[in-house]
Image (tube, rainbow, N blue to C red):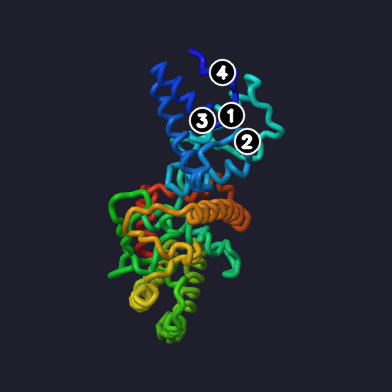
C-alpha cells in the first residue's frame, strides 16, 4: 500500500499536506499512522500559536534548522519522553522529504542536515552511580553557567525525575514543612518531594542569607588516633576524603592491617562526620524554611524572568502567554546545549568515555537507583 500522493494543487503549506496525510491514512484504516500524524499536526498547531499568535499555518520554507530546534525544545518543555519526541520529529522529516522526492518542493538547503534526529533505543542504559559522583566532583567555577546546569541536573534526578519545565517554575512558596509540594505542569495531581541530602545542599546555594556562612564557619573539635583537632565541617570532610583515598590506595598486603584502616575510617565517619553533617542540615533546613516565608513569590532557581510570570497561578490550570511559553522553550534549548557541555567536561576531566546523552527528561525510575546517595549525600 503506497503513501498518500499529493494533488497537483501544491500550495507550499506543510501543515495542509500533513492534514491530508491524516485523512488518507484514516481512509485506508491505517490507524497507527493516522494517530501519529494527527498528533504531530496538533502539536505543530499548538507550537505555532505559542510562537506567534494567529499563526495557523506552516509553509515548507519556514522549516529551518532553528525551527526544528525550537520545536524539539517545545516538546521537551511539555515533558514528553525521548521516544515520543523522536517519533514526532521522524514523522515530520519523512513527510518533508516525501514532498522533496516527488518533486513538489525544492529546498535550497537541507534543514535536517545540521539537525540530528536521534534514534530511540528502547533498552537504553542509565547513568551509573560512579558517573553521578563524577558529575558532582567536576571542578567548575561558580561563575560558570555550567555550575548551575550541574545543580539543575542533579536536582532533577534526586527530585524523582523532575521535569525541567517544572523545575523552572518552582517557587519558594512551594517549600513547606521540609518538603516541596507543587502541581506539575501538564499533570492533575500534586507532587511531593522531601528535602534532604543533595537536594538541601543545592537549594541552600540559591538563597541569600548570612546565617549560612555563619553555620559553615563553626569550628568543631574531634579526636583522631588519640589527638584532639579543631576545624570547620569543610575541613573535616576534606580530611575524611583524604583518609578514604589513602585507605583505598593503600599498598598494604596484610589483610588485618587493611581491615583495621577500613574500620578506623568507618568509625570516623560514624562518630564525627555524620553527627556534624546532621546538625548542619537541621540548621540549613531551618534557614530555608524562614527564607521561603519571606520570598514565597520568587522562583527558586534563577532561570526564568519572574516579572514575566508574576500573574501565573501555578496551583491552577496553566495557560501561558506566547511570550512566557517562548521563554520556557528557549531556556530549555539552552539547558540542553549546556548538558552536552557538561557531558564533554566529565569525559575530559576524568578520562571517561560516557556515551550516554545527558537529557533534561530524567525517567522517574532512575531515582530508585540513587536513593542511597539521596539519603547519605555525596
Q: Are marks 1 and 2 in contact (CB under 8 Å)?
A: yes
Front of the two marks 1 and 3:
1
Marks 3 and 4, Cα distance to the nearest angstrom?
20 Å
**Whole-percent x, y for residue 335 in the image:** 54, 55
**Whole-percent x, y for residue 55 in the image:** 53, 42
Q: Residue at x 62, y 38 (%)?
A: 62
Q: Secondary structure at mark 3?
A: helix
Q: Secondary structure at mark 2?
A: loop
Q: Residue at x 36, y 47 (%)?
A: 365
Label 1 belongs to which residue?
A: 96
222 lies above or below 54: below
Q: Which disc is residue 91 wearing? A: 3
**Whole-percent x, y for residue 120 in the image:** 49, 36
Front of the two marks 1 and 2:
1
Q: Which disc is residue 112 wearing? A: 2
Marks 3 and 2, Cα distance to the nearest angstrom?
13 Å
Label 4 belongs to which residue?
A: 7
Q: Are marks 1 and 4 in contact (CB under 8 Å)?
A: no
Amino acid at each position: 500500500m503506497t503513501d498518500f500522493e499529493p494533488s497537483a494543487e501544491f500550495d507550499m503549506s506543510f501543515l495542509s499536506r500533513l492534514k491530508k496525510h491524516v485523512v488518507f491514512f484514516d481512509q485506508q484504516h491505517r490507524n497507527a499512522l493516522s494517530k501519529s500524524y494527527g498528533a504531530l499536526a496538533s502539536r505543530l498547531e499548538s507550537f505555532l500559536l505559542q510562537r506567534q499568535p494567529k499563526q495557523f499555518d506552516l509553509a515548507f520554507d519556514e522549516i529551518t534548522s532553528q525551527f526544528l530546534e525550537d520545536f524539539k525544545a517545545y516538546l521537551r518543555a511539555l515533558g514528553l519522553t525521548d521516544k515520543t519526541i523522536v517519533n514526532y520529529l521522524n514523522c515530520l522529516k519523512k513527510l518533508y522529504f516525501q514532498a522533496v522526492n516527488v518533486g513538489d518542493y525544492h529546498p535550497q538547503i537541507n534543514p535536517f542536515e545540521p539537525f540530528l534526529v536521534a534514534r530511540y533505543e528502547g533498552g537504553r542504559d542509565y547513568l551509573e552511580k560512579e558517573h553521578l559522583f563524577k558529575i558532582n566532583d567536576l571542578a567548575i567555577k561558580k561563575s560558570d553557567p555550567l555550575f548551575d546546569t550541574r545543580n539543575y541536573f542533579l536536582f532533577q534526578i534526586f527530585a524523582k525525575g523532575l521535569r525541567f519545565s517544572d523545575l523552572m517554575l518552582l517557587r519558594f512558596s512551594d517549600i513547606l514543612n521540609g518538603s516541596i509540594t507543587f502541581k506539575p505542569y501538564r499533570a492533575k495531581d500534586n507532587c511531593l518531594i522531601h528535602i534532604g541530602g543533595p537536594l538541601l545542599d543545592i537549594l541552600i546555594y540559591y538563597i541569600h542569607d548570612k546565617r549560612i556562612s555563619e553555620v559553615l564557619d563553626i569550628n568543631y573539635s574531634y579526636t583522631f588516633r588519640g589527638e584532639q583537632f579543631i576545624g570547620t565541617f569543610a575541613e573535616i570532610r576534606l580530611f575524611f576524603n583524604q583518609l578514604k583515598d589513602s585507605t583505598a590506595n593503600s599498598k598494604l598486603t596484610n589483610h588485618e592491617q587493611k581491615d583495621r584502616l577500613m574500620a578506623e575510617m568507618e568509625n570516623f565517619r560514624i562518630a564525627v562526620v555524620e553527627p556534624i553533617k546532621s546538625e548542619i542540615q537541621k540548621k540549613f533546613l531551618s534557614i530555608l524554611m524562614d527564607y521561603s516565608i519571606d520570598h514565597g513569590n520568587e522562583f527558586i532557581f534563577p532561570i526564568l524572568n519572574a516579572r514575566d510570570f508574576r500573574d501565573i497561578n501555578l496551583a491552577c490550570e496553566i495557560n501561558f502567554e506566547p511570550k512566557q511559553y517562548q521563554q520556557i522553550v528557549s531556556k530549555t534549548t539552552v539547558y540542553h546545549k549546556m548538558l552536552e557541555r557538561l557531558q564533554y567536561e566529565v569525559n575530559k576531566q576524568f578520562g571517561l568515555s560516557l556515551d550516554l546523552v545527558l537529557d533534561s527528561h530524567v525517567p522517574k525510575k532512575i531515582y530508585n537507583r540513587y536513593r542511597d546517595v539521596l539519603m547519605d549525600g555525596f
